[in-house]
Every structure is written in C-alpha cells, then in structure tokens.
Image (cartoon, coloured by chain):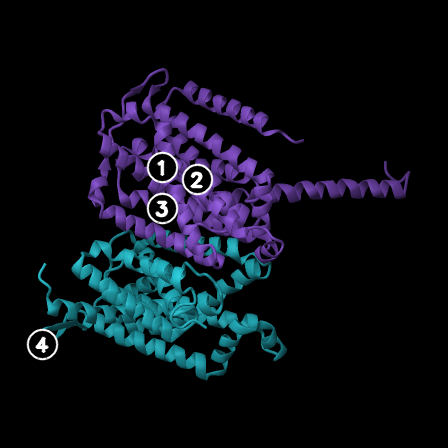
Chain colours: A purple, B cyan
Amino acid sequence: MIVRTPVFLIICLAVGAAVFGLSLEVGNDYVFFAGYVILQYVVLSTAWNILGGYCGYVNFGTAAFFALGAYSTVAIYKLIGDNDLPHIMPMPALMLVGGVVSGIVGFGMGYLTLRLRGAFFSIATLALAVVLQTLIVNWDFVGGSRGAYVIRPEEMPFIGSYVRYLFLMMLLLAIGAIVIARLIERSKLGYGFATIRDDELAAEALGVPTLRLKLIATTISGALMGMAGAPFPYYIGYLQPDSTFALDYAVNSIAMPLIGGTTSWVGPLIGTILLGTLQQVATVTISSAVNLLIVGCLLVGFVIIAPNGIIGLVHTYLQRREEDFVGRRHVSADAPGTVP
Amino acid sequence: MIFSFDLLINAIVSGILIGGFYAAVTSGVSLAFGILDIVNIAHPAFIILGSYVSYIINATFGFDPILTSIVVTPLFYALGAGIYQIYYLSFEKRGQESLRGLAFFFGLLFITEVSLVLYFGVDYRYVNAPYIGPTWHFGDLDVPLRILVPFAMSMLMIGVLQLILTRTFIGRAIMAVAQDQLALRLMAIDPIRIKRIAFGISIATASLAGAFLIIIQPVEPSVGRQYIGRVFAICVLGGLGSMPGAVIAAMLVGIVESLTSTFYGPSWAPAVSFGFLLLTLAVRPAGLMGR
C-alpha cells in the first residue's frame, strides 16, 4: 500500500487536528505544557534521524542546534522590544529565522568535518555545543550567563491561552518534519543517504555525490532542530544557557530514534511517544534525574539487544509468523490427510 | 590592561602543568580511539568515577588519593575489559560500531553520571592530602603543589604507558592490532584478546586521571563533560594514537587555555579546545605527529 505524499499530509493533518481537539477536550492547560515537550522531541528526533538514521552519522550536538534556534528568537526579541514582537514577527517567522541560522551552522560544521571519518563529525558536534555555550555565556546582549526573560503574550485570538498556540505551532512543525522525513525516505535523496549508511566507499566509487548528500542531510537536520528551538523561549519564559545547552536534548534525540527504529520515519515517532510519555510520567512521579537514568539504560539496552529498535522487533515477529504460516502450509501440502 | 611579564610567565607555567594533567586524561582516549578505533566518549565519565572512588576511600580511611587510585587500577581494568567484551559481541562483531557503538558509549556516559548524581548529589567533593595546601615560590613564580604533584605523576604514568607500548610483548601486539589484525591472527595471537587488554588499560588510566582531577579541583558528577571536547581535541591535535604527540598537544592546549583565561577571562577558556579541534580538522587532519 503506497500512500502518496499529499494524501499522507492530509492524514497527518487529520491526526493532528484530532490530537489538538482531544487536548482541548481535556480542558486543562497542563496537557498542552506536557504535550509541547513531547511534540518538540518528535521534531528533534525526526531531525536527528535524517542524518543519524538515514546517513549513519551520529550528531551529539542536538542541544547546540536547538539552542541556536532559541537564542535567535531571544536576539530578535531584544532587538525589537517585547511589546511589538508578536505583531512584527509572528511565531512562524521566528521559527524560520531559527531554522535558517541552525541550517547554516549545520552546513558549516558538515563542510569542515564530513570529509573525514564519521567519528570526527560526532566529536566535533559535541564540542560545538561547548563552544556555542561559551559564546552565549559571554554575549551580554542575549542575557549572558544570567539568562534572559521573555514575556509571553497572555492570550491569542481564537485559540485562548498562549501555550495552546505554541502547542499548535509545534504540532504543525512536527507534522512538517514527519512529512519531510517520509518524502526524503522515498526519494532519490533517501536512497543516496542509504548508500552512505551502508557503504560509503562503494557509494563514492559508484558516483554517488556523498559529500553533497551529507551536507544536504546536515543542513536539513540542523534547520529542523533550530526551528524546534525557536518557540522555546516563549514556552519557558526564562532562557538560561545551562538548561538550553543541556545534554538531555542530545541523549533524548539519540535514544528516541534508536529505540523506535532508525530506518523509517515511524521509528522516531514511536520512540518519542513512548519515551516522551514515560519521561513526563517519571518527572512528575519520581524525579527528573531518574528519568535520565531510565533513558540511558533503555538506550544501552536497546542498542545491545534490539539493534533495529521496536520496528525491527515487530518486523522480525511478523516475518517469523509468516514463515510459520508458510511452513505449515508446506507440511499440509506434503502430507494431505494428516492435518485435522 | 598593562601587560605584565609575571602574569605571562605564571600563565605559561600553569598551562604546562595543567597540560600535563590533560595528557594523562587524554592517554586513555588516545589508546582507545587512536589505536583501537573505539570512540569511547564515556571516558570522562570513567574519570569522574575514578575521582569518586578516591574520594570515598580518602574520606572514610584517609588514604592518599593517588596511592588509592593505583591500588584500584585492577578493578578499572576489569571494568574496561568487561565493557570491551560487550562492545565487541554487540557491535564490532556485527559491524555496527559506527552508529550503535557510539550511542552505546553515550548511554554509558549518562548512566555513570546520573548514578553518581543520584548517590552523591551534585555537591562538589574534594580530598585531603598533605600536598594540597602549600605552594612553592620561585621568585615571582607560584607553583601550587596541588597541581605540581598530579603533573609529575601524569608524566610518570604516560612514561610507563609508553614503555609498555614500545618495549613489552603485549604493548607491541597492541600497536600491531592497530596496523593489521589479520597479520596478527596469522601469528597465532588473538586480536580480540589484545584489544580487550588494551581497552582495559585505557580504562585503568581513568582511575589515576580521576585521582589527579580531584586533587586539582573539587569534583561533581557533570564536571566530566567539560573534558569531552578537550580530550578529543588534544587527541586529534596530537595525531591519533601517538603518546608523545598527545603530550605536546595537551601542553599546547593547556598553555593557550591558561593564557586565554588570564588575559580574556576564564569564561572564554572552553572555546579554546574547540578552536584547536576545528583548526586541526580543517588544516591538518593527521595531527601534529600523526602516523
């Protein structure tokens, strides 16, 4: 069954509308606060998977790209002033700016390190987070190490509280990210990415423009992460370097696709919904430190025991059942009459 | 600002001393990443583990932290050998080390760090030893023993490591694993066993480096993160798998960091190592003394 992209987009929008409707039905704004975080991780893990899952290049710098998006919003906010911003620059425009900034940085990083072995790229992304954090800490215009306050507008027309509006924006971005990921997966680009993941040398020898493809992947991936970060200052209200550059983002955006399964867009989505919900529950009931421990253990457990994630497990299960079925039919064909 | 000669000399000397310590931190990564091709980004977490082991024993029995760390190296060696066995069976054997192996070590980093946070909290811990207080003065030059002792021990440790690698049978076998596994197999040596030993040694160095760290500065579980970028920058700058290269690179990074924090303020220092890393990757990816 092949669903064409426009149809898929409509299905996604319908599911999105249902999610939003159900959240409204609950009537409690906490649902939007918690849901926003999960949606944000849907975007981050899908974006990570475009580079990590499709091309096989591990990015440890999710926090860096995310924070770039968040801090471009803060910079614009400081530049324009708090009262006029929502009128001059609506949220989609801010997301776009964040996306462009992160996309450019992603491209630059990729250009410097992707010509070398994969591990160098991973290490460089890890270090990128440290350096950007240093720059932000020393940049007083966006608050420096003290952090920056962003005043959230009280109400939005038609929707109600501002957090609902943010939730809606993130929902749309998540749908966008999933559609992009699925589109890439089924296009020539996706096959190019897969050749890089499976055997880069062979791909290069066959004339696949590996460097260009990898740069496209880092740019798209970085841009999506930046877009996910752009509304964050409005969500949190007080942006501070330590929490914005937290490694939590990196470990979550790696764990979610790996737990779900990295080869298709479904994997990060499943992983995020499971792990994100689990974390929200664990944060409320136990503590936020424990929930990182859970993520770490699940990540290690899954990469050792189920390398292809939940999708892989389901796939093997279905295949085995099919084999059983076919096997049984063979038996019955060989010896008719023995089967009751 | 008035340029002061004393300040410059002091900054350079303390940079060299700190650099020696960085070299000790890097030696384990240099062994794992440079020679065995295992990207162990959890190494700094094991160093913090080493710090905490020294801290516990120092706080309960009052033993010397460095002596303690030498005594517990077999435990760290066993830990490293165990981790390599898991890594080999789950990733190297299946040829999946690039994506899942990296994620595995990243997960280990988090498990170690969060476990320490849950058990000890995020308070800074420190050790007591006779050489932590005093400072030697040479004219205008101040040399705190708290940094001099770890420096000397680091140099000693790297010297011993280098001797093991170049003079003993096992050491030469480790160097050979990096070059040609098949040839090693043809000489009836099991490359997996050699790699297991080498990774064990790599983690064993973390025990010592951890003790040095907690002597130099108070430690809390997330301090290790600051070392991830630094350590790999030094490793790449020095040339993968070269111990002398790592020492020179470590001192270079130490000096530049120390000068930066003296003349521009300590908040800029973390950017130095990354600057070095990017510069090396762009200009000379083989590093200073690359093979």
Q: Which label number is shown at residue A44?
A: 2
Q: Quadrant of residue B214?
A: bottom left
- Secondary-structure class at tag 4: loop
Q: For the N terminus of chain A, which image quadrant? A: top right
- Residue at point 57% right, 42% down? A189
Q: Which label number is shown at residue A98?
A: 1
Which chain is disc 2 placed on? A
Q: Evaluate whether residue A292 shows in this view.
A: no
Q: Identity of the amino acid at label 3?
A: Ala
- Secondary-structure class at tag 1: helix
Q: Identity of the amino acid at label 1?
A: Gly
- Secondary-structure class at tag 3: helix
Which chain is disc 1 placed on? A
Is mark 2 in CB contact (under 8 Å) with mark 3?
A: no
Q: What residue did someone put label 3 on?
A: A64
Q: For the C terminus of chain A, which image quadrant? A: top right
Q: CA distance from mark 1 to mark 2?
A: 14 Å
Q: Identity of the amino acid at label 4?
A: Gly
Which chain is disc 4 placed on? B
| Above or below: residue A271 compared with residue B54 | above
Give the x, y percent position of residue B217. 23, 62
Q: Earlier in the sequence, mark 3 or mark 1?
A: 3
Q: Which label number is shown at residue B139?
A: 4
Q: Identity of the amino acid at label 2?
A: Leu
Give the x, y percent position of residue A334. 89, 43
Q: Earlier in the sequence, mark 2 or mark 3?
A: 2
Q: Quadrant of residue A276?
A: top left
Callout in the foreground (1, 4): 1
Q: Evaluate whether residue A216 shows in this view.
A: yes
Is mark 3 in CB contact (under 8 Å) with mark 1?
A: no
